[in-house]
Image (spheres, grey):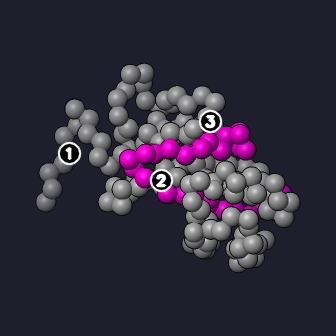
């Protein structure tokens, strides 16, 4: 299924996307945070879509917009098509329901996003730090993170 055909199919999903577009040959679908779980189930369980693999999950800090972006790069191994399912959540309450119950591979990816950005995935079976050492304070990929030993380069 090509990008345009996939976009048409997703247009009839039970959840109305906030945005549905083709960028760089990849379909991006943005939904509200409260609809992520419902859309994920639809994407996996609909036979014509059959998104059965989470390649990776990511988080982006949009400091100037006071929000985080959380996305999952999904693949259908059966139909050989890809999709980025994403949502935006507020910086002051960075919580999202885990998708690890739908795709087990999301487990480790969500732990990485939690560790580096501090986004909590409610319902996650083992939401613990993954990359930083025990006792590490803060979230190093947040744009406002400042480590006590870090000296930023002077601005020109």
The Cα atoms of the two marked residues, 1 and 3, are separated by: 37 Å
Start and end of the magenta stretch? 77-106
The mark that comes first in sequence, 3 or 2, is 2
Please say whether residue 144 is visible from this viewpoint.
Answer: yes
Q: Is residue 105 magenta?
A: yes
Task: Select label 2 or label 1 by which is in front.
Answer: 2
Give the answer, above or below, for where 139 lies relative to 41.
above
Kindly identify which residue carries mark 1: 152
Q: Where is residue 68? Give x, y as percent.
A: 44, 53
Kindly identify which residue carries mark 2: 89
Of the 4 image quadrants, the one containing the C terminus is: bottom left
Q: Nearer the viewer, residue 72 or 40?
A: 40
Image quadrant in which you'd find residue 8: bottom right
Residue count near mark 3 (Cα–Cα under 10 Å), binned few <14, some 14–19, many ≥20: few
The structure residue drawn at horizontal position 30% and vertical position 42%, both measured from the top left corner, is: 145
The structure residue drawn at horizontal position 86% and vertical position 60%, both measured from the top left corner, is: 47
In terms of secondary structure, where does tag 2 sit? strand
The mark that comes first in sequence, 2 or 1, is 2
Residue count near mark 1 (Cα–Cα under 10 Å), binned few <14, some 14–19, many ≥20: few
Kindly identify which residue carries mark 3: 123
């Amino acid at each position: 299924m090509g990008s345009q055909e996939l976009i048409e199919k997703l247009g009839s999903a039970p959840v109305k996307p906030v945005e549905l577009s083709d960028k760089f040959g990849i379909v991006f679908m943005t939904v509200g945070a409260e609809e992520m779980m419902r859309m994920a189930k639809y994407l996996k369980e609909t036979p014509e879509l059959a998104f059965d693999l989470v390649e990776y999950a990511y988080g982006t800090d949009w400091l100037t917009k006071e929000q985080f972006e959380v996305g999952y790069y999904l693949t259908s191994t059966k139909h050989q098509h890809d999709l980025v399912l994403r949502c935006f959540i507020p910086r002051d309450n960075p919580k999202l329901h885990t998708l690890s119950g739908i795709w087990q591979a999301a487990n480790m990816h969500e732990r990485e996003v939690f560790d580096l950005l501090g986004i909590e995935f409610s319902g996650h079976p083992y939401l613990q730090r993954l990359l930083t050492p025990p006792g590490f304070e803060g979230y190093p990929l947040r744009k406002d993170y400042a480590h006590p030993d870090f000296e930023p380069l002077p601005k020109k």
